[in-house]
């Protein structure tokens, strides 16, 4: 119940502790955010992600039925994940393969910075 504790880029300060999903998503979409996905969260709740063309992504926690938004925030950045490079002021490198390549069935090879990291080749 801490929706009012976090600042969201491009969104006026939210004063309510919780908000209906419809009202919250209307607020976000009016500023160009879009829903990216959702997944179950701890405590029988729902985690929902929102993206934006220029602002950092938003992660939110909803009630188990998805009708009430309990909190929303910009998660800590993770290097190599999507467009989070903007959080560090870095430019996306085009000289290396992306870190989010699909995994082939039966393959345990990981590629990082163009080097094959396998158990045989640490």
Image (cartoon, helix red, strand yellow):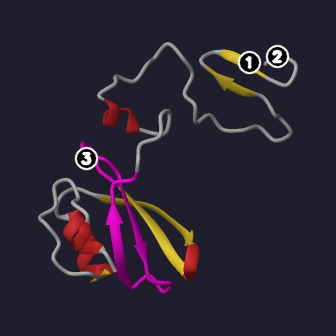
Cβ atoms under marks 1 and 2 closer than 8 Å: yes
Mark found first going from the N terminus, 3 or 2:
3
Tell me the element at label 3: loop
| Relative to 11, residue 108 above or below | above
| Relative to 34, residue 89 above or below | above
Mark 3–mark 2 Cα distance, whole angstroms, equals 39 Å
Where's residue 55, x and y in %? 25, 46
Is 81 in the magenta?
A: no
Q: Which residues are magenta?
A: 51-75
Tell me the element at label 2: loop
Seen at 50% across and 33% down, the residue is 80
* Disc sitting over residue 116 in the figure: 1
Mark 3–mark 1 Cα distance, whole angstroms, equals 34 Å
Camera-nearest label, 3 or 2:
2
Q: Is residue 68 left or right of residue 117?
A: left
Q: Is residue 18 left or right of residue 92?
A: left
Camera-side residue of 105 and 20: 20
Seen at 59% across and 18% down, the residue is 113
Cβ atoms under marks 3 and 2 closer than 8 Å: no
Where's residue 81, x and y in %? 49, 39
Residue assigned mark 2? 121
Mark 1–mark 2 Cα distance, whole angstroms, equals 7 Å
Quarter placement of the N terminus: bottom left
Seen at 35% across and 51% down, the residue is 57
Where's residue 4, x and y in %? 23, 73
Which quadrant would residue 13 be assigned to in this image? bottom left
Mark found first going from the N terminus, 1 or 2:
1
Which quadrant would residue 117 be assigned to in this image? top right
Is 66 in the magenta?
A: yes
Residue assigned mark 3? 55
Tell me the element at label 1: strand
| Other residues around mark 3 within 10 Å, as few (<14) / some (14–19) / many (≥20) | some
């Amino acid at each position: 119940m801490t929706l009012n504790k976090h600042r969201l880029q491009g969104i006026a300060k939210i004063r309510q502790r919780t908000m209906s999903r419809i009202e919250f998503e209307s607020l976000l979409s009016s500023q160009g955010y879009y829903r990216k996905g959702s997944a179950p969260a701890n405590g029988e709740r729902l985690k929902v992600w929102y993206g934006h063309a220029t602002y950092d992504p938003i992660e939110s926690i909803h009630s188990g039925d998805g009708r009430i938004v309990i909190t929303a925030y910009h998660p800590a950045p993770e290097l190599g994940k999507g467009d989070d490079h903007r959080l560090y002021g870095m430019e996306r490198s085009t000289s290396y393969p992306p870190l989010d390549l699909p995994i082939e069935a039966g393959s345990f090879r990981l590629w990082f910075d163009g080097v094959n990291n396998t158990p045989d080749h640490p």
